[in-house]
Image: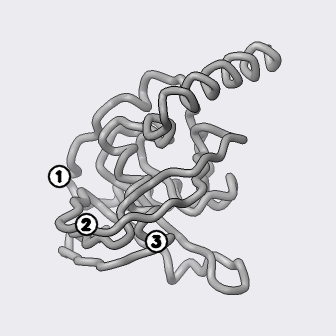
Amino acid sequence: MIREVITYPNKLLRVKSKDVEQFDSELHTLLEDMYDTMIAEGGVGLAAIQIAIPLNVLIINIPNEEDIQEKDELIEAINPIVTHKDGTQVFTEGCLSVPGFNEDITRAQHIIVEYFDRNGNKQTMECEDFLAVAWQHEMEHLAGHLFIENLSIIKRKKFEKEWKKKIKDKN
């Protein structure tokens, strides 16, 4: 089922998500809905808080060389934590919760993440480049942050001004 993606400045996006304690059918339904929503919205990642569920759940599905998101490549991460990060890279990011806005963000180039899969099995993933960016972006959501908070003061002010105008023009 496709759910509504909440957008900035919705206050829920500032909520710090809670750890999942039950690895049950309710969690599996949430993961299925998150996948359907992410694909419908054209995203490569989605955190549960983006559909107004404050749980430490995220999914990532990076397109392959043919720009196809293979479902068997889907990462479902429950209660993830970054255990190591190093290097830096700059990547132009966008966000389903900040539609139509993209900006260069600096993040770690290489990370190691520990998380649980949908059945409660512990996993470790080492990644770099775009996949590392996606992990860091989605994990920021779980902490109640958005990528726009990484902008310089000047870029952030410009964003806020343009965003307010965009919302006003919509209404």
Evaluate whether residue 115 shows in this view.
Answer: no
Q: Position of residue 122 (x, y in %)?
A: 18, 74
How many marks on residues?
3
User: Which sits earlier in the primary sequence, circle 1 or circle 3?
Assistant: 1
Labelled pair 1, 3 in contact (Cβ < 8 Å): no
Find residue 70 and report its image quarter: bottom right
**Front disc: 1 or 3:** 3
Answer with the quarter of the image where residue 156 lies.
Answer: top right
Query: Could you give the CA–CA distance between mark 1 and mark 3, rounded to whole angstroms?
Result: 26 Å
Q: Residue 74, how many percent across, how many down?
A: 48, 74
| Residue that extends furthest to the right in the rendered view of this protein | 169
Instruction: Determine whether, in the image, residue 58 is placed left or right of residue 69.
Output: left
Q: Position of residue 60 (x, y in %)?
A: 48, 66
| Residue with the most extreme bottom position | 65
Q: What's the residue at 41%, 68% (across, down)? A: 132
In-image side of 50 versus 80 (left or right):
right
The amino acid type of the residue labelled 2 equals Lys
Q: CA distance from mark 2 to mark 1?
A: 26 Å
Q: Which residue is mark 3?
A: 131
Kindly identify the amino acid type of the residue bearing the numbered disc 1.
Answer: Glu
Tag of residue 21: 1
Dot 1 alpha-carbon crowd within 10 angstroms: few under 14, some 14 to 19, many 20 or more: few
Amino acid identity at mark 3: Leu
Helix, strand or loop status at disc 1: loop
Residue pointed to by mark 2: 85
